[in-house]
Every structure is written in structure tokens, then in C-alpha cells.
Amino acid sequence: MRIGKVVSHLGFELELAILPLEKLRPHEETIPAAVSTLREELLHDEVQFDPVIVDSNTMTILDGMHRHRALIEISAKSCLVCAVDYTDKRVKVSRWLRSVSLQEQSVESLSRQLHLTLERKRDEAIEMVDLRKCSAALLWGEKAYLFPDQGGLFQSFKIVKSFDSLCSALKLEVSLEPDDKPDLHEVRRAILYVPMPTKADVVHAALTSTFFPPKSTRHAIPARPLGIGVPLEILRRQPSDDTIDMVSELERILGKTTPRRLGPGAIYKGRKYEETIYLYEP
């Protein structure tokens, strides 16, 4: 891309730039309440502190779907982004899994309503989903209920949407669990288990606007810049074909401070980051 400032982290390039919002391609839907919170935060601060993470080749948004949507809703025309090479093996994609606290009878009822009609042992069900031989499974203890058809990845995520809607109607609190959490086998919690998306799946979703449900994928990158602070006044300008002005504005902003490098495990704005962060806050 080479229209911004490149920060190198152990040979991994993070390119900061200000780009038109219309060029960015989300791959997931958003949660209205989360968008509203970010919208109010942006209006209060009058700046975008943290960049949206995008693939430098396809402009697929990897992290920052809600921030992207909030900027659109406050009439911004451009967005601060951090572009990375999504094909780099150091960029990882994984999944979020949904879980709810249920008794066994309620698990069976929920399975029927989701049309998960085949009963299998837990490990067998997990293997079938991982091999994409079925679309989804509801795990409970050592048991599992499977969706009988191989409808492809996006059939799986239709089931996720149905699960979210049904749990909301039943007033069940849904928790998001990383798929590497060690206690996912915990009895009394039902886990909706879906296939692992690939990078190709993510890009396909973005390019075709066939969106995943909110909070479906998890992306990890070796490092990320935070706390930069681009004023909304700049982001509300109409993008120009000539990018020199935006590059100059970004260089000016970045020149005001030297980023602090914080190792994995650092906490910023209440969130713990597993990767290294470069914090531009004064």
C-alpha cells in the first residue's frame, strides 16, 4: 500500500494510514449496542485513538468492525487504519464459541429448536465439525447434538444467528469463549461448536458481503499500535484522489510522540492484549 507510516516489529510491518471508509470491507455484522457505545466515545473524544486493522491486499477489516460502523454513523469519510499482510503466517485467525448455562433437559429442548437432531459423543461431534462433515454441534458434558446436513461454513453461522436469537428470546445469557479455553468441557454449560474459519473464508465474506454474525472470528497479529488520536475534523473531510495531505496529517500527528513498546499482557483501556502494543499516548 505504502501510503502511510510503516512501523516494523521484529520484521513484521504495520502500516498506519488514513483511508476512505468506503474502501474498507467488513466481514462480520455488528452489535448495535457496541456501535452506539463507540459512537458516543468518538463524539466525546473528538478523535479516533485506535486504528482499524485491515488486510493490506483486500482491505478486509480483521479487527475493528464496530469502530468502522461507528465512524460511518457520525458522518466520517475516512478512517485511521493499520494495514498488515494477511497472508503472513504470523497473522492468525481463530473463532469465538458461544456458551450458555443450562440443565440437560433444557439443552435437549434448545437442540430441537435449532434442528440439531443427531446425538453423538462429544469427541466424535467435535471431529465431525472440525472436518466440516456437519455444520454445528451443541456440546454438553460428554454428549453432543449435531446439525444433520453439510451446508457449508455459512450454514454453520446461520445456526449461530439462530442460537443468538433463540437465547435472547429465552432470556439466556450467552458468553463468548475462546476456542482454546481449557474448561470448555465444563458440565452445565452448553457450547455451540462451529467450524474454524480460514483466512480465505474471511476474505470471501468481505468481498461478497456474506457477513459472519458478530463476534465470530478472532484475529491475532504480532503487534498493534494504539492511542494515536486522529481528530474527527480530519476524518470528516472528503477524501481526495491525492493522498499527500492525509499522509502529511498523519506524519504530523505521529511526530508529536514516541510510542512506548509494551509487551504481551499489557492492559489498555481495560482490555488485556496478548500481543505487543505500541502506545502513542503522551
Image: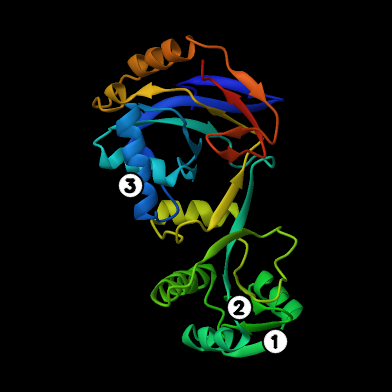
Give yes or no for contact between labels 3 and 2 (Cβ–Cβ under 8 Å): no
Mark 1 = which residue? Answer: 120
Residue under label 2: 138
Where in the figure is residue 112, as x and y percent of width and height? 51, 89
State the CA–CA distance, disc 3 to disc 2.
31 Å
Question: Callout 2: 10 Å neighbours few (<14), some, many (20+)?
Answer: many
Residue at 71% over, 79% down: 141
Q: Residues within 10 Å of mark 3 (few under 14, many from 20)?
A: some
Circle 2: residue type: Leu
Vertical side of 162 occupied by 49: above or below: above
Left or right: 108 with respect to 265?
A: left
For residue 14, side relative to residue 159 (left or right): right
Instruction: Please name the residue shown 71% across and 71% down the image.
Output: 186
Q: Nearer the viewer, mark 3 or mark 2?
A: 3
Return the residue at label 3: 36
Find numbered disc 3 in the image and state the secondary structure of the residue it sits on: helix
Q: Earlier in the sequence, mark 3 or mark 1?
A: 3
Res 214 seen here: yes
Q: How many marks?
A: 3
* 33 relative to 235, above or below: below
Residue plotted at (45% across, 71% down): 158
Is residue 240 in view? no
Q: In front of the other: label 3 or label 1?
A: 3
Quadrant assignment, res 242:
top left
- Which mark is first along the chain, 2 or 3? 3
Q: Earlier in the sequence, mark 1 or mark 2?
A: 1
Type of amino acid at the residue the image marks with label 3: Ser
**Front residue (pair 235, 256):** 256
